[in-house]
Amino acid sequence: ETGVTQSPTHLIKTRGQQVTLRCSSQSGHNTVSWYQQALGQGPQFIFQYYREEENGRGNFPPRFSGLQFPNYSSELNVNALELDDSALYLCASSLPPNQETQYFGPGTRLLVL
Amino acid sequence: AQSVAQPEDQVNVAEGNPLTVKCTYSVSGNPYLFWYVQYPNRGLQFLLKYITGDNLVKGSYGFEAEFNKSQTSFHLKKPSALVSDSALYFCAVRAGLSGTYKYIFGTGTRLKVLA
């Protein structure tokens, strides 16, 4: 059984640019969540997708958007990047009936200059 | 406001001694509670969860946690610490209903087990 994979592993962008991060969920997992983890902080919940529909959202502005595809992989898009968007972005997948148990990928480290 | 608090930034314990990592929460309704561990340069790993039932839940690597509703706490424990347990531990809660879920993580507690 393959785990959660994320790409790219590292990324450098400049302020105002747009970025797309990708996540492949664990085999059979139809729920995907995204988190932002700033240095020295706990993960902050961005949103969750279940069967291609948004299933919950944290306190992030609309320039953070997402997609889930029919194969349950997912993308996180961030527009108009700000310096404070520099962080580790984590993807987590889960499988009903235990959707609350999340399995995390290694993350994508984004640096905004 | 919904929140999770981990009052200790770091916990030091000698190998072989029992360990406790503290967590308190403030959410409405009946929360789902979790502990995750993060090793350097790796993603978070699920340790255990409480949904309902027995207040003492057992998880991976010999860890357990006790749910206390009156104190709104969910402390992580292990009877005998190992050096390999040294890592960053996060308490988390899921709040809300289907379609409006929110996952709230604490700021983390760094556990250092000394040989």
Image: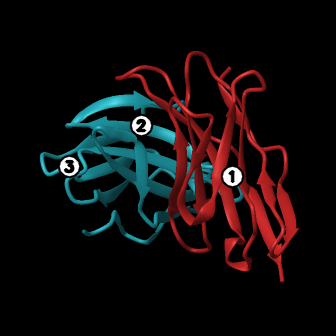
Pinpoint residue A21: horizontal percent, then vertical percent. Answer: 36, 57
What amino acid type should be assigned to the residue bearing mark 1?
Gln
Q: Quadrant of the C terminus of chain A?
A: bottom right
What residue does disc 3 label?
A72
Task: Identify the colour of chain B in the image.
Answer: red
The residue depicted at 49 percent of the width and 47 percent of the height is A35
Number of residues whose C-alpha sits closer than 10 Å to that of mark 1, classed few (under 14), some (14–19) or many (20 or more):
some
Q: Is residue A18 visible?
A: no
Callouts 3 and 2 in the same chain:
yes
What residue does disc 2 label?
A47
Residue A87 is labelled as: none
Pinpoint residue A84: horizontal percent, then vertical percent. Answer: 62, 50
Q: Nearer the viewer, residue B51 or A79?
A: B51
What residue does disc 1 label?
A41
Q: Is residue A51 left or right of residue A41?
A: left
- In the image, residue A94 sits, relative to residue A63, either above or below, namely below
Callouts 1 and 3 in the same chain:
yes
What amino acid type should be assigned to the residue bearing mark 2?
Phe
Q: Is residue A101 visible?
A: yes
- To which chain does the residue with label 1 belong? A
Q: Nearer the viewer, residue B59 or A111?
A: B59
Number of residues whose C-alpha sits closer than 10 Å to that of mark 3, classed few (under 14), some (14–19) or many (20 or more):
many
Task: Identify the colour of chain A in the image.
Answer: cyan
Q: Quadrant of residue B5?
A: top right
Q: Quadrant of residue A56?
A: top left
Tag 3 secondary structure: loop
Of label 3 and label 2, which has the lower sequence position?
2
Q: Are marks 3 and 2 in contact (CB under 8 Å)?
A: no
Of label 1 and label 3, which has the lower sequence position?
1
Tag 1 secondary structure: loop
What amino acid type should be assigned to the residue bearing mark 3?
Tyr
